[in-house]
Amino acid sequence: MLNEAKRIEILNVPVDMIDMEMAAERLAELMKTPGCSLIVTPNSEIIVNAGKDPELMEIIRSADLVIPDGIGLVYASRLLGNPLKERVTGIDFLNWVLDLLEKDGKSIYLLGSRPEAEGSLSVAEIAAYRMKEAFPGLKVAGTHHGYYKEEEEQDIVRDINSSGADFLCVALGSPKQEKFIARYREELGVKAAIGVGGSLDVWAGTVKRAPEFYRKHGLEWAYRFAQQPSRYKRIIALPKFMIKVLLSR
Ligand code: UDP
C-alpha cells in the first residue's frame, strides 16, 4: 500500500518512492476516491523548473501521486541517501492506466498534441485508435488537440465532462498540462488526471520511443537528443539538475 510508501524530497519537490507495481496499486485506489485525483510524473527538468515556478511547485505538492519519471531522479535519490528502486516512466505508467481502465470498463479522454492536418487525423485521434487496437475493451470517451485558444478552454472542459470520461490524459507538455489540470480540478468530473508530455505522439507513431537498449541503460535522453538535436537545451537540464542536487546535500 502506498499509504506506507515514503515520499522523499528532491530540491524541495516531493517524489513518491514507488515502483511500477506500487504506482499501479495506487492508481486503482485513486480511481475509487472522490474528486479528481492528480497524478504528476516529474523528471529532472520539471524538478528544476518547479524551483523557478512557485505555481508548478504548489501543483506537484498537491498531487496525489508523484511518479519518479527519469533516470536523473534515481541518481539524485541515491545521492540523497534515499535510493528510489527504479524510475517509472510516464509512458509505461500510461500502459497500466489503459490496462486498468479496460479491465474495469472505464473510459479515457485524450487531450493534447497536434491537430488534424490535411488528409490526416489529429495525433490524439490516431493515438486513440492505436490504444484501442492494443486494448480492445478500452473506451475512449473523446479527444481534443492541444493547440486551442485560451478562450476555448471552458468548452474543452465541458466536452470532457459531457463525454462521461473516467480518466483524463493531458499531453500539452509541462508545465502547461499540470496547470490545466490544476486549474480545472474542481470542475472536472473525471476520477483522475495525468500530464503525459509527448506520450500521445509516441502512441500515434509521430515520435519514436527509444529502443530497449537505451531504456534499459537509462539512456533515453541520449536517444531523444539524437532524434531531435533541437532539444539540446532540455538535455543540459540533466547535468544542471545533478549539480543542484549535489549542492543541496
Ligand atoms: N503540445 C500541445 N499544445 C501546446 C504545446 C505542446 O498539445 O501548446 C503538445 C505537443 O504537440 C507534444 C506535447 O504537447 O505532443 C509535449 O511534448 P514534449 O515532447 O515537449 O513533452 P515532454 O518532453 O514534456 O514529455
Image: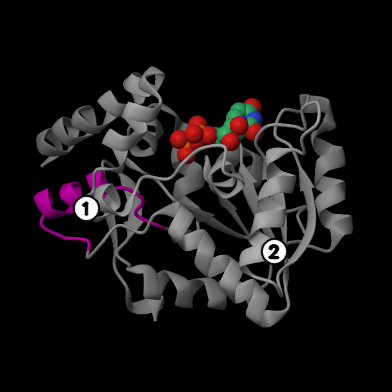
User: Where does ligand 1 appear, by image quarter?
Assistant: top right
How many marks do you count on the picture?
Answer: 2
Among the 4 quarters of the image, the one containing residue 15: bottom left
Query: In the image, what residue type sits under mark 2?
Result: Lys
Answer yes or no: disc 2 within 8 Å of ligand 1. no
| Numbered range of the magenta stretch | 67-84
**Label number found at residue 74:** 1
**Disc 1, SS:** helix
Residue shown at 10% from the left, 37% from the top: 246
Query: In the image, what residue type sits under mark 1?
Result: Val
Q: Residue 232 appears at what percent x and percent y?
A: 32, 20
**Disc 2, SS:** helix
Is 185 left, or right, of 197 in this rendering? right
- Residue 167's place in the image compared with 47, above or below, is below
Is 4 left, or right, of 122 in this rendering? left
Q: Residue 107 appears at what percent x and percent y?
A: 74, 67
- Earlier in the chain: of badge 2 and badge 1, it is 1
Query: Which color scheme does this rendered protein use?
Result: one colour
Residue shown at 59% from the left, 45% from the top: 200
**Label number found at residue 132:** 2
**Label number found at residue 211:** none
Residue 98 in view in this figure: yes
